[in-house]
């Protein structure tokens, strides 16, 4: 039975103490309340996994507490205790949000089974939430050939044995999310949820609510209480992508959470404690952001417990072909075309391209080719224009006679120098390492016949 944070509410001191002692003996954390009023106060201050609630109490009765708990502690399982174990009482309690009920005097074996069922329901909810966002990272890492990526993965797997905060540093699309998922799957938290949050894709107005949740009426449009992603990640891993883009206000709240494991939902003063591991990622130079005053230094050091550089795809060209083949295999299965394969010429183009969009761009390119292919072999003409153009630029020179190829190369070189210097011919001459007068001569010849030299 997993450990639960339980609130026991009963006006009978002897029973309240007996229930608390037994639950603690089973390894649970227990808080007690002697009245409905005290229970509502505690529910407004803390988060509980399970509420054991007596229905018959003076003042605010159990049914009223149960109904109000649906607003202030909607995510807790509620089990009611009653000396009147009639069907009508049980049905009314279920209507108001109870998940189970027990009759007094409490049978501890039945109590244990009821608590066990409640925690299993909670575990299944968490698992279901995790499956919605969980990625199968292993295939993309199984055939890594580059030494730089192997080193990163090795360090990551070592770090997975602890709960240390991890900071992944690398360009957009380089595979930081896949590595974060691999770390989660390699850790003791693998059975828990993996929750992904793209901090830059959510507006400043909503990111705080997305992470920490909000109460009903906390802001316009908050029609009900909402659990934040950090609560959803309890027992697992929260991956905060693009952490370098969050606002100063959110940086402060994240720092407090990293230091204490506690936060308050937007619009609430109730402290919630969550046990989840944080993995953060950014394509920014966080040390430079700290120097520029845009990122909190104390948050940077809190995140930077273990920093791992993620090499770009152009820095690990050995991985381009196996990644491309894995993506093609996936899309071929989805399209029902198992015979799709990469033409050797296509593989060569893929290897030579610099991939500014990294693994994400490669994946998109392979998907495009798989969808558009009329034949089983994916030829270079199916590649997106931005990938094919540099390859064509290299290939057309090789297909020309020597003098024409040199003339075209010269024209391109001059155009590139002028483009880089904004059309300034003096600076272009300096860039090319030639005299300004010689540059003028080259420019005059650029669109005319060759100068007749044969040497």
Image (cartoon, helix red, strand yellow):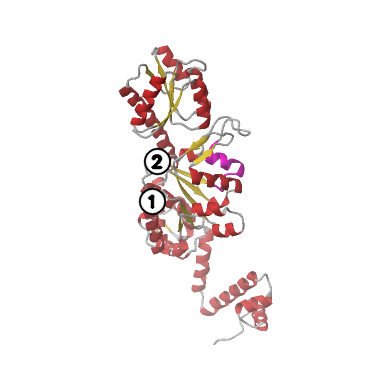
SS of the residue under disc 1: loop
Range of residues picked out in magenta? 199-213
Quadrant housing residue 119: top left
Q: Is residue 155 magenta?
A: no
Mark 1 lies on residue: 160
Does residue 79 sit above or below 221 in this rendering? above
Kindly check if marks 1 and 2 are in contact, taking CB atoms under 8 A apart as contact.
Answer: no
- The one of 309 and 235 positioned closer to us in this rendering: 235
Q: Residue at x 50, y 32 (%)?
A: 46
Q: Quadrant of the N terminus?
A: top left
Q: Residue at x 57, y 74 (%)?
A: 408
Q: Residue at x 67, y 79 (%)?
A: 444
- Residue 88, how many percent across, how many down? 42, 12
- Residue 99, how many percent across, how many down? 42, 23
- The one of 72 and 395 positioned closer to us in this rendering: 72
Q: Mark number for residue 192?
A: 2
In the displayed structure, does residue 267 sit left or right of residue 338? right
Does residue 207 sit above or below 298 in this rendering? above
Dominant secondary structure of the residues highlighted in magenta in the image: helix
Q: Is residue 200 magenta?
A: yes
Q: Around disc 1, counting alpha carbons within 10 Å, would you say few (fewer than 14), some (14 to 19), or many (20 or more)?
A: many
Does residue 240 sit above or below 292 in this rendering? above
SS of the residue under disc 2: loop
Instruction: Identify the mark nearer the N-term, 1 or 2.
Output: 1
Q: Around disc 2, counting alpha carbons within 10 Å, would you say few (fewer than 14), some (14 to 19), or many (20 or more)?
A: many
Quadrant housing residue 55: top left
């Amino acid at each position: 039975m997993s450990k639960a944070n339980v609130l026991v509410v009963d006006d009978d001191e002897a029973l309240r103490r007996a229930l608390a002692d037994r639950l603690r003996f089973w390894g649970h954390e227990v808080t007690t309340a002697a009245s409905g009023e005290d229970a509502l106060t505690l529910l407004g201050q803390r988060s509980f996994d399970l509420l054991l609630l007596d229905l018959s109490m003076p003042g605010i009765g159990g049914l009223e507490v149960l109904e109000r708990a649906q607003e202030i502690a909607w995510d807790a399982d509620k089990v009611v205790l009653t000396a009147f174990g009639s069907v009508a009482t049980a049905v009314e309690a279920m209507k108001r949000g109870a998940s189970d009920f027990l009759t007094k005097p409490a049978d501890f074996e039945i109590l244990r089974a009821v608590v066990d069922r409640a925690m299993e329901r909670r575990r299944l909810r968490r698992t279901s939430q995790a499956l919605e966002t969980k990625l199968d990272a292993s295939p993309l890492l199984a055939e890594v050939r580059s030494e730089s990526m192997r080193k990163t993965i090795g360090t990551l797997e070592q770090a997975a044995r602890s709960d240390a905060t991890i900071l992944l540093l690398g360009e957009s699309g380089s595979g930081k999310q896949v590595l974060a998922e691999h770390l989660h799957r390699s850790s003791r938290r693998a059975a828990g949820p993996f929750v992904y949050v793209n901090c830059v894709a959510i507006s400043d107005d909503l990111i705080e609510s997305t992470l920490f949740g909000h109460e009903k009426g906390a802001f316009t449009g908050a029609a009900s209480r909402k659990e934040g992603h950090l609560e959803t990640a309890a027992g697992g891993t929260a991956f905060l992508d693009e952490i370098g883009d969050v606002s100063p206000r959110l940086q402060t709240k994240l720092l407090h959470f990293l230091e204490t494991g506690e936060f308050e939902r937007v619009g609430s003063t109730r402290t919630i404690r969550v046990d989840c591991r944080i993995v953060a990622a950014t394509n920014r130079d966080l040390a430079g952001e700290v120097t520029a005053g845009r990122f909190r230094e104390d948050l940077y050091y809190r995140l930077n417990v273990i920093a791992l550089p993620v090499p770009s795809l152009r820095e690990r060209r050995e991985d381009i072909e196996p990644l491309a083949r894995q993506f093609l295999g996936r899309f071929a299965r989805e399209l029902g075309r198992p015979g799709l394969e990469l033409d050797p010429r296509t593989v060569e183009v893929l290897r030579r391209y610099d991939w500014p969009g990294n693994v994400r761009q490669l994946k998109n390119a392979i998907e495009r080719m798989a969808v558009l292919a009329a034949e089983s072999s994916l030829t270079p003409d199916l590649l997106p224009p931005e990938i094919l153009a540099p390859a064509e630029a290299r290939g057309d020179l090789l297909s020309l006679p020597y003098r024409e190829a040199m003339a075209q190369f010269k024209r391109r070189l001059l155009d590139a120098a002028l483009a880089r210097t904004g059309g300034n011919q003096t600076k272009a001459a300096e860039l090319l390492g030639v005299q300004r007068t010689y540059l003028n001569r080259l420019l005059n010849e650029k669109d005319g016949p060759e100068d007749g030299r044969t040497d």
